[in-house]
Image (cartoon, rainbow, N blue to C red):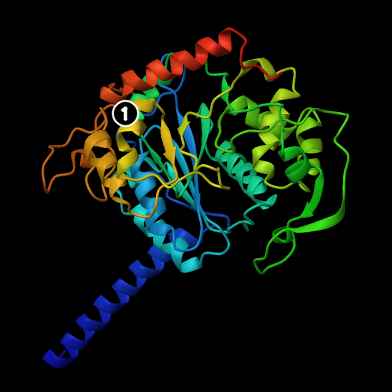
């Protein structure tokens, strides 16, 4: 073979191999139209153990819309731990390119590739701001997480505008002493103005049946309040147990389905559905704590969404003892403060925990190497969070925040 032909053969062979690698990479994301899964490397670098003698496991549903890929990735890294499970979702208003980019970002993290504990939804759900498509997406996420992983204890709902105020080691350490059948749902039966403006109006979410995005529309008449069950309301940001979500999804009682059909025609049903299911269920109403573990600041008068948190809110946030806060502007300076002072997290790096065994440095990611992931170590944030949570649990034990 002449030198020129040999050179062309080498060039063609290299191009062909590169093409095969590219096809293999893409096929990893297109193996399912429902979610982009990242199988764990074999063997596991450290086995994840479950049970009451080990720290609890959290299943995170993290959602965002168009343009939120980088935002979701930042939040994902901030709450990452190898023991947990993660499902990320860009709603139908985002593009497939964004979902692919988010998937590539998640897969670029070595520990995620090793443990295979994060997935990106490939077939997106619609999201109408005030409609029932939101609660449908949350229930779908819970169903996916139940199918993917049999070991998690609590389901946590986050959006792209949320951020943690403690590390996952702190969260797991404090929750290790919490009964694992407790749901955390901010709830009340005092509907106030919501009865006339959210429950009695009959609305339809076009996102259920239209491909294009539009807003809910109202029927001309209002409906009476239900007599078969009581309506409860509260914060849509919940921390739910596995057993309660199995009750909602598998439905050995018809209550969850009945309420889902009813709240399909309510305004902002995510502020009513889980609250009403849990408080109308004898099995769960007495094991539900009236708290969402979040920090908010409301404008005066309050608007539809809480105030955007900034650097001036930082000290009050830290003193609150909350696990999470919302809402934050994209890449706001206060997020950098939380990363630096609380999470000790570098840019595009996971929040360090006891599982991270690498050297800490400007060019070295301490979480590029890991040890026993079943060990957690409490940091400074655990004390404030534990004090806050103990106060909440004391109120619950006293019966002052039950489903009344």
> Of 273 and 217, which appears nearest the observer?
217
Question: For the point 34% across and 44% down, which residue is it?
Answer: 77
Residue 334: x percent and y percent?
A: 30, 45
Which residue in the structure is indicated by mark 1?
A: 373
Question: For the point 75% across and 32% down, which residue is it?
Answer: 251
Q: Is residue 291 above or below residue 108?
A: above
Residue 56: x percent and y percent?
A: 44, 23
> Of 198 and 73, which appears nearest the observer?
198
Q: Is residue 283 above or below residue 274?
A: above
Task: Give the secondary structure at mark 1.
Answer: loop
Question: For the point 28% across and 26% down, which residue is it?
Answer: 372
Is residue 140 toward the left or the right of residue 377 in the image?
Answer: right
Is residue 30 toward the left or the right of residue 350 in the image?
Answer: right
Residue 95: x percent and y percent?
A: 51, 67
> Of 231 and 280, which appears nearest the observer?
231
Is residue 48 toward the left or the right of residue 154 in the image?
Answer: left
Within-10-Å neighbours for mark 1: few <14, some 14–19, many 20+: some
Question: For the point 79% across and 57% down, which residue is it?
Answer: 218
Which quadrant is the C terminus positioned in?
top right
> Of 364 and 402, which appears nearest the observer?
402
Q: Residue furthest front?
A: 301
Q: Is residue 199 above or below residue 207?
A: above
Q: Is residue 398 above or below residue 71?
A: above
Residue 166 in sight from this viewpoint? no
Residue 14: x percent and y percent?
A: 24, 76
Q: Residue furthest top?
A: 398
Residue 163 in sight from this viewpoint? yes
Which quadrant is the N terminus positioned in?
bottom left
Quadrant in the picture for residue 325: top left
């Amino acid at each position: 073979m002449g030198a020129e032909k040999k050179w062309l053969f080498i060039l063609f062979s290299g191009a062909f191999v590169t093409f095969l690698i590219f096809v293999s990479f893409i096929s990893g994301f297109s193996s399912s139209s429902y979610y982009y899964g990242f199988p764990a490397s074999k063997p596991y670098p450290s086995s994840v153990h479950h049970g009451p003698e080990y720290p609890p496991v959290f299943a995170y549903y993290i959602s965002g819309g168009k343009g939120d890929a980088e935002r979701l990735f930042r939040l994902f890294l901030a709450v990452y731990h190898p023991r947990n499970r993660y499902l990320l979702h860009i709603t139908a208003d985002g593009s497939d390119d964004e979902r692919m980019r988010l998937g590539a970002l998640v897969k670029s993290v070595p520990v995620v590739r090793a443990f295979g504990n994060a997935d990106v939804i490939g077939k997106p759900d619609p999201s109408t701001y005030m409609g029932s498509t939101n609660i449908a997406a949350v229930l779908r996420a819970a169903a996916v997480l139940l199918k993917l992983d049999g070991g998690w204890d609590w389901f946590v709902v986050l959006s792209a505008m949320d951020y943690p105020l403690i590390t996952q080691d702190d969260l797991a350490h404090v929750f290790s002493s919490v009964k694992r059948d407790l749901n955390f749902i901010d709830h009340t039966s005092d509907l106030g103005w919501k009865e006339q403006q959210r429950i009695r109006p009959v609305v339809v979410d076009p996102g259920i049946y239209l491909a294009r995005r539009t807003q809910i529309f109202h029927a001309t008449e209002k409906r009476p309040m239900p007599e078969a069950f009581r309506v409860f309301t509260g914060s849509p940001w919940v921390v739910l147990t596995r057993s309660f979500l199995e009750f909602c999804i598998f439905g050995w009682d018809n209550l969850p389905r009945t309420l889902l059909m009813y709240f399909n025609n309510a305004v902002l049903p995510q502020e009513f559905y889980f609250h009403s299911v849990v408080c109308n269920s004898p099995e769960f109403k007495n094991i539900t704590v009236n708290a969402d573990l979040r920090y908010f600041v409301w404008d005066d008068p309050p608007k539809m969404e809480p105030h955007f948190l900034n650097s001036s809110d930082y000290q009050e946030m830290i003193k609150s003892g909350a696990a999470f806060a919302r809402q934050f502007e994209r890449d706001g300076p206060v997020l950098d403060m939380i990363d630096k002072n609380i999470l000790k997290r570098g840019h595009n790096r996971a929040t360090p925990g006891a599982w991270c065994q690498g050297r800490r440095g400007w060019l070295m990611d301490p979480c590029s190497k890991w040890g026993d992931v079943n060990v957690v170590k409490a940091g400074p944030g655990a004390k404030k969070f534990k004090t806050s949570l103990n106060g909440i649990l004391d109120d619950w034990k006293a019966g002052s925040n039950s489903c009344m």
